[in-house]
Image (cartoon, rainbow, N blue to C red):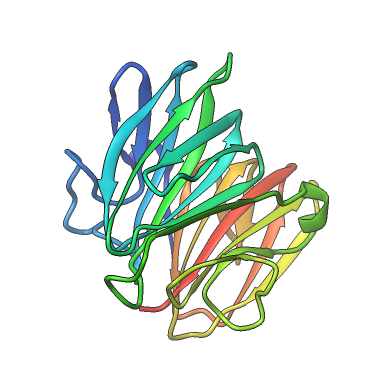
Amino acid sequence: MIERRTFDSLGGADHGWLKAKHHFSFASYGDPKRMGWGALRVWNDDTIAPQTGFPAHPHADMEIITYVREGAITHRDNLGNQGRTVAGDVQVMSAGSGIMHSEYNLEQDATRIFQIWIIPDERGRAPSWGTKPFPAGDRSGRFVALASGMDGDADALPLRTNARVLGATLKAGETAQYTLDKRRYAYLVPAKGVVEVNGVRLDTRDGAAIRDETSLEVKALEDAELVLVDTSP
């Protein structure tokens, strides 16, 4: 089962400095049919104006993955962590027992990110943060684990949940395969480009809610950049 969720159908908010689209219920947007997908709870598509951002605020017991699509995001937290994550790279914050953080676009142009929240397998662990570069060439024509709590993904940023976040870049006409356990849930979004997933067309920034599938064949109809989450029910 692959349910296409068009970009135009997503919830959203315009705060001036922040233009957000929500694949799932978030903040003032509520849809009882879109409360999450397995352990995946949030997928926000955020555009942040230059020299603005999210001031310090708390989180607890959530795995928060930031995939930077354009520009860069600068992170600071009360653990003393500070870092700048640029387009194509990823940061992971395990909120654990509690963390206070800020996320700012200190660049001269807009920053565009996917913010993905996944429910952790355990609560109350010590919070942590990390970032890592993932060169686009390393995931050319194939899915590569960017963040993971599953076996065999030693090069990915660690997650405290039975899930993985993957990325791929495809040239027009290329195809990538991904094997999926039929019991698990997947959600795929093209950050750029147009693709077909098992024959279902997805335009840029559409979402595909996937379950009861054992394999995915993703064909690029034009040059594409993909983000895929594979998670437990």
Rendered view: 85 above or below 104: below
Identify which residue, 114 or 97, lies in the foreground.
97
Left or right: 92 as drawn, with respect to 179: left
Q: For the view shown, which residue lies furthest in the front direction?
A: 80
Left or right: 156 as drawn, with respect to 118: right
- Residue at 65% over, 41% down: 193
Left or right: 190 as drawn, with respect to 220: left
Horizontal and vertical percent for residue 15?
28, 21
- Residue at 76% over, 63% down: 142
Horizontal and vertical percent for residue 99?
32, 51
Instruction: Give the image quarter of residue 224.
Output: top right
Rendered view: 17 above or below 99: above
Identify which residue, 178 or 46, lies in the foreground.
46
Horizontal and vertical percent for residue 107?
57, 19
Identify which residue, 66 or 173, lies in the foreground.
66
The reply to whether residue 1 is in sight is no
Q: How many marks?
A: 0
The reply to whether residue 57 is in sight is yes
- Residue at 19% over, 51% down: 31
Q: Quadrant of the C terminus?
A: bottom left
Instruction: Give the image quarter of residue 232.
Output: bottom left
Q: Quadrant of the N terminus?
A: bottom left
- Residue at 59% over, 31% down: 72
